[in-house]
Image (tube, rainbow, N blue to C red):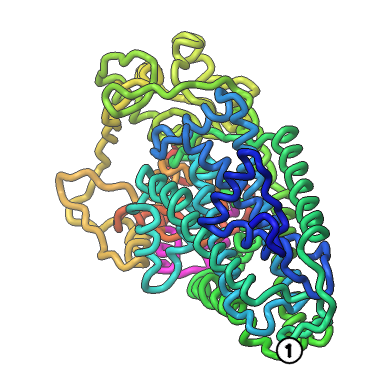
Amino acid sequence: MDNEPGNSMPMGKGFAGRLLHWLDERTGVKEMAHKVLHEPIPGGARLAYVFGSGLLFIFLLQAITGVSLALYYTPTAETAHTSVAYITKQVAGGAFLRSLHSYGSSAMIIVLALHFLQTFLYGSFKGRRELLWLSGAVLSFLVLGMGFTGYLLPWDQKAYFATAVGTNVVGEMPLIGNLLTRLMRGGDAIGTLTVSRFYVAHVFLIPGAIFSFIAAHIFLFRKAGPAGPVQEHPIAPKLAPEPFYPRQVMFDMGFVLLIMAVLGALAYLRPATLGPIANPADTHFLPRPEWYYLPMFEWLKYWEGRKVVLGIVVIPGLLATAFFLMPFLDRKLERRAWRRPIPALAVAVVVFGMVFLGVKSQLDDGQGPIAEQLALQAREEKAYSAAAFQPYVEPKDAIVAVSLPAGPASALSGEGKGIFMKRACFACHGATGMGTPAAPNLTGVSEKYGVVQLEALLRNPNARMRAGRMPSVDVSAMDMKALIAYLGVIGTASANVPAVYPTPPPSPSIAGRRAPSFARKASMRVGAAPHLVQEGQPSPPPPTVAGHRLFQLRGCFVCHGMAGTGGRAPALGPLVAKLTDPELAQILEHPNSRMISGGMPPVAVTREEMETLLSYLRSLPMQHAEVEPEAENVTPK
């Protein structure tokens, strides 16, 4: 058998030769290798044909590095971030391995785009190659799915909020949007079920589908054969062929070595970073997706209200359909791009549009308060990546995972928590005081400074605190004592006490009279019945005053200014004037994609609270200069 014609790998008489001979008799591996290596390429080998082999190599690289990372990863909201930090900071070569995997995903998108452009420009999808194109189109969407599902797994700030935006966008689809969002998240909120589902999709479901379609793609390619250069006939090749081996093999190997060198250099010189753990209560974080999703991210900013369906469903759906049906839309056997002006122009417009949107998104992010916030987030991410590894501490009572001892709960702590919430300290320091990118973690702050020094800092913040927009806390001595008591238990189980709010003194009331005329008009404006003040009951605050208190308690002032006249977010007076009350309530409860991308969370309040909030928003001035609030002075923090 060693001397049979056509065998390119003669058998030796050693152990390796006998083993190969044994395998060949049972599998025909020698004949398969001969067919692959001697496959005729019409018109000869070319550098333009290297992208398919490059994609296969990158996918194998992603599979190997992904399996290695999965050995250490734990897919829960409590431990995912710590496990990635352990890989990056503790495992030998872990940072390099994770960086290879991270940069490999971007490399796969780039090479995939080049492969499709080369296939289109060469007209290589023509001539009984429709199924070959369709299998490649499915593979491209699977690759995008791998990028989307893998983005959440580090469970840092960037991953959490970018995934929140992505799943919210899916929710804008008519009829099935909410169902798909709940299916992806495993419920209404992003948590452990979301991480688990994304992990299963990223590690098992999508890779399995990719392996299947790669096999189908290779089979269909071998069946149809290489298309050759643009001047070659797509069905009956006429140019002199050249075997795949050795020239095309050398081209492919050179391209693969180039990919290895670039990815290795990037992974070594610029390791992938990891940001702080996801904090859903952070209202300041500006989510940004990976670079290959930036065009879609920028595209969503132009569609609001009822037009959202057109922008995120209809137009992308039509483009995806045209992409899949390209071989059926461009049916002529002519392969040269300059003789196919309409398809070539359409592809050029789409490619230029995507590049333009991506560049515009980057330019917009480089200006104004957005640039400052993104720079802050980048510094936080870099600082966390450089910090020492902190192991996960199993919580003893399933409330918080901290290593500090739990102090005794007290009524004074509850009163301090009420002051902490009323002063809207949570807007910067987080709902539990555990910190956000805008303000530090308050755990152990009373031990760090001592009671006397801490009170002095709260009443007279230093220059660094004021630069972070920390106002002075002007409260009574008793309220200050309660607030410091609560700060002393932050990060312990004792912080899980109900907030106690002081009861406001009753206001004088007039029996049987209606509320003041401005309040009655505000209530009627949102469809509420006029409010009657009953004898013997304290008068409720006017809607405008109650709405201002809600505006402060929700931390809206952090972005929109103390009086809603603008800050890192626009002034509200000119905006609300353009909307009716039902429209305003709808957009507050369900922010559009542009508001979400700016960090605007949904406003979940009761109907009565929404009415008071609308009343306050209607009272805001039209100018953009900061003015004193008309309601009671509620100082944040």
Q: Residue furthest bottom?
A: 332
Tell me the quadrant of the picture where the N terminus can be found: bottom right
Which residue is the site of mark 1? 333
Give the vertical position of 411 relative to 88 (above or below).
above
**Callout 1: helix, strand or loop?**
loop
**Residue 242 visible (yes or no):** yes
Give the vertical position of 324 relative to 213 (above or below).
below
- Is residue 573 inside the magenta stretch? yes
The image quarter containing residue 467 is: top right
Task: Say which amino acid is labelled 1.
Answer: Leu
**Depth order, front residue of 333/350:** 333
- Describe residue 526's horizontal placement relative to residue 462 as left or right: left
**Depth order, front residue of 440/20:** 20
Residue located 68% across and 84% down the image: 127
Q: Residue furthest left?
A: 536
- Is residue 327 inside the magenta stretch? no
Question: Residue 33: image x %, image y %?
Answer: 65, 59
**Residue 568 visible (yes or no):** no
Question: Residue 17: image x %, image y %?
Answer: 64, 44
**Depth order, front residue of 551/105:** 105
Question: Residue 319: image x %, image y %?
Answer: 60, 76
The span picked out in magenta is 568-588
